[in-house]
């Protein structure tokens, strides 16, 4: 397979996973208030993936920087570089993990898997929304997940979903979509694993966004979270209709 063709496959299908990884960090926290809150503008070590806190409520929006790493057959490989979690109270948390979180996404089944092994040692910076910025240097894009809700949770296990997604590209454009059917993400603490259950129609929306394969410059400055929020609000309008998965893997 040629390099250009391989890259096209990564852009069209692999980024379906990236848009879901933002939810991964939110799904790992039992409750924001259970983490040790930090003073505004100050950084603090996290006490674990279950202790990402600081806003006093469950996150409703998450923004992240992602980087394409490659393609192996029908599976895309990616990394989550940084994430910002936003709550309803006007505060946000910048999360920097010990190393990028790595994951894979199968383009045939529309299923993704993300390891949280690299989460520690993580640091968090808590502040008001207007004082938090999203690092973008070297990233393929900034992805936002919105309208997030918890469907089920118990100790070490959580199921969440999001109903909107936004996309911010290196050329400065922004797109945002309302999903006809929310995308679900499950987190298992014992396995240190996040499972992503997406669908082809959502994948195609992502493909339309990441068709250029551009990246933010290595020296790009962080983008203010307030700017991303404004761009998302202005762009939201189009719906991403649901389509059933083309292939469902049999058990065994």
Image (cartoon, grey):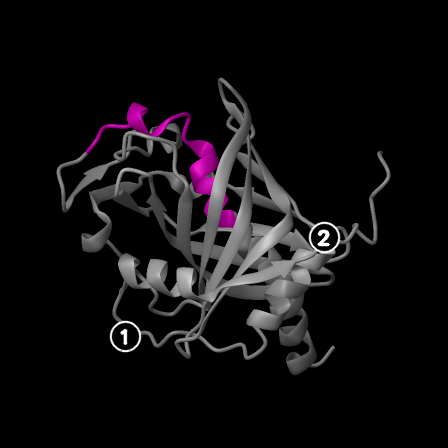
Q: Does residue 36 appear in the picture of this structure?
A: yes
Query: Image quarter for residue 77?
Result: bottom right
Q: Along the horizontal axis of the image, is 32 left or right of 221?
A: right
- Asked whether 216 or 56 is in front, the reply is 56
Residue shown at the point (56%, 71%) measured from the top left: 210
Q: Does residue 97 appear in the picture of this structure?
A: no
Structural distance between the alpha carbons of marks 1 and 2: 38 Å
Q: Is-magenta flag for residue 20?
A: no
Residue 102 position (above or below residue 214): above
Q: Are marks 1 and 2 in contact (CB under 8 Å)?
A: no
Compare marks 1 and 2 and give the one earlier in the sequence: 1
Q: Position of residue 111 (x, y in %)?
A: 69, 47
Q: For the image shown, how many numbered marks are present on the structure?
A: 2
The residues colored magenta run 21-37
Residue for badge 1: 219
Q: Secondary structure at mark 1?
A: loop
> In front: mark 1 or mark 2?
2
Residue shown at the point (63%, 68%) measured from the top left: 207
Question: What is the magenta segment's predominant secondary structure?
Answer: helix
- Asked whether 111 or 238 is in front, the reply is 238
Residue for badge 2: 242
Q: Along the horizontal axis of the image, is 57 left or right of 12?
A: left
Q: Within 10 Å of the Cα at label 2, are there few (<14), some (14-19), or many (20+) other Cα atoms?
A: some
Q: Position of residue 228 (x, y in %)?
A: 35, 62
Q: Position of residue 178 (x, y in %)?
A: 57, 54
- Which disc, if any, is residue 63? none
Q: Secondary structure at mark 2?
A: loop
């Amino acid at each position: 397979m040629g390099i250009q063709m391989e890259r096209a496959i990564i852009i069209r299908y692999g980024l379906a996973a990236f848009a879901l990884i933002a939810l991964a960090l939110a799904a790992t926290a039992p409750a924001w208030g259970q983490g040790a809150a930090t003073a505004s503008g100050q950084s603090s070590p996290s006490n674990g993936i279950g202790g990402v806190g600081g806003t006093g409520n469950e996150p409703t929006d998450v923004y992240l920087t992602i980087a394409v790493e490659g393609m192996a057959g029908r599976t895309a490989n990616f990394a989550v570089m940084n994430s910002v979690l936003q709550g309803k109270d006007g505060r946000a948390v910048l999360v920097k993990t010990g190393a990028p979180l790595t994951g894979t996404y199968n383009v045939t089944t529309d299923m993704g898997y993300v390891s949280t092994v690299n989460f520690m040692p993580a640091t968090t910076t808590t502040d008001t929304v207007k004082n938090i910025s999203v690092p973008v240097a070297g990233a393929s894009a900034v992805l936002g997940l919105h309208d997030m809700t918890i469907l089920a949770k118990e100790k070490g296990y959580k199921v969440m979903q999001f109903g909107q997604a936004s996309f911010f590209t290196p050329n400065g454009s922004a797109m945002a979509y309302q999903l006809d059917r929310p995308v679900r993400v499950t987190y298992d603490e014992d396995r240190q694993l996040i499972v992503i259950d997406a669908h082809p129609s959502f994948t195609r929306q992502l493909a339309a966004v990441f068709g250029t394969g551009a990246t933010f410059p290595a020296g790009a400055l962080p983008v203010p979270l307030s700017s991303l929020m404004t761009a998302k609000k202005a762009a939201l309008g189009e719906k991403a209709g649901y389509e059933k998965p083309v292939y469902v893997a049999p058990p065994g």
